[in-house]
Amino acid sequence: MKFLDEAKVYIFSGAGGAGAVSFRREKFIEFGGPDGGDGGRGGDVWVEAVNGLNTLIDFRFQQHFKASIGMHGMGRNRTGSNGESVTLKVPVGTQIFEEDNETLIIDMVTEGQRFRLATGGNGGFGNTHFKSSTNQAPNWANPGLPGEEKTVWLRLKLIADAGLVGLPNAGKSTFLASVTRARPKIANYPFTTLHPNLGVATVDEREFILADIPGLIEGAHEGVGIGDRFLGHVERTRVLLHLVSAQEEDVAKAYKTVSYELEAYDGGLEDKPEIVALSQIDVLDEDELKKKAKALQKACGKKPLLISAITGKGMTEVLRALRDVIVENRSDADNVLSDRPKKMRHKLEDTIEEIEEDEE
């Protein structure tokens, strides 16, 4: 199973069945009259947000979804059966767009949410409907109405509490692997992360979801590098953890580069609460560490946290800082991950592990 966050699908709702032209013909009944039944209604096309999905990979193998047509009416006033509807099952956080990929139809943000994308056609009237005092034997009926046909785009924005941002090789994947059961690819070259990763972090018996996205570089909003296509996955987060590698020659420039890309993305990311951390501090001596921490503080306007995922230094403090912001911004109506059964939490991370194993 691979990660896929955008898919184009074609949907067709069912046409309504035609009404029947029929007349009652029974022995010893001279004037039977019309008894044609109505056609059945065509099936609808629905979309439903379900738990346990974290990718749109299913829509890579099936792009066409067609509901059944309604059955035609029959004699003896028998109405045709309705056509069967079809349901597109998508992960929570999926947005549905029109064919132009810009007009939003619906945002599926809660589990169990359903929305009708295409309505089936109504069935036609049988000739019984057209009987009158002046026309007691109508010999016509209505055809069923056609269904709807349209193309829609599915775009997934993962649901997470906190998002990790930074330049490539800032230590985001290492951070995620050290505080969760997720196993993202880690290497000492840029863009080892090619798709978002999710993990569940725990601190002081409180749990929250972390999302790691591919690194940003200067010009990402113009498509440089991997671009900013994955920034949508941190739009729904409550807080951003901005990691700046201590190996950077100019930590202030590194911070400003990512901050500019977040602002240029124009998705409200620049307004989110941000925690800044200087990562990979185990590679610096004491004097160099103080120098870079001071430069980073001047650039971001706040004292950065100093962390090392290898030695574990500062990791608990940064998790607590993230937790405090999440709890502060989380309403009682929101789903709290710690309230879900353990097997559901493990299923989330097991799914991510399956993605990684498949790609290896």
Image (tube, rainbow, N blue to C red):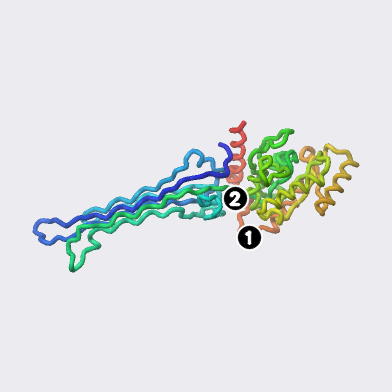
Whichever of callouts 1 and 2 sits on the residue coming sooner in the sequence is: 1
Q: Nearer the viewer, residue 323 or 273?
A: 273
Q: Residue furthest top?
A: 360
Asked if labels 2 and 1 touch by Cβ distance under 8 angstroms, the answer is no
User: Does residue 181 appear in the picture of this structure?
Assistant: no
- Mark 1 vs mark 2, foreground winner is 1
* Residue 203 left/right relative to 108: right
Residue indicated by mark 2: 340
Q: Quadrant of residue 125?
A: bottom left
Q: Quadrant of the N terminus?
A: top right
**Secondary structure of the residue carrying numbered label 2:** loop
Q: Nearer the viewer, residue 90 or 22?
A: 22
Query: Local crowd at mark 1 within 10 Å, few (<14), some, or many (≥20)?
Result: few
Q: Residue furthest left?
A: 28
Q: Quadrant of residue 357?
A: top right
Tell me which amino acid carries mark 2: Arg
* Residue 344 left/right relative to 74: right
Residue indicated by mark 1: 332
Residue drawn 64% across the image and 42% down it? 196
Q: Which mark is residue 275?
A: none
From the top left corner, tell me how far across and down residue 76 is, in percent.
21, 56
From the top left corner, tell me how far across and down residue 312 is, in percent.
78, 41
* Residue 54 left/right relative to 205: left
From the top left corner, tell me how far across and down residue 8 is, in percent.
51, 45
Q: Nearer the viewer, residue 298 or 201?
A: 298
User: Does residue 243 appear in the picture of this structure?
Assistant: yes
* Residue 247 left/right relative to 32: right
Q: Quadrant of the C terminus?
A: top right
Tell me which amino acid carries mark 1: Asp
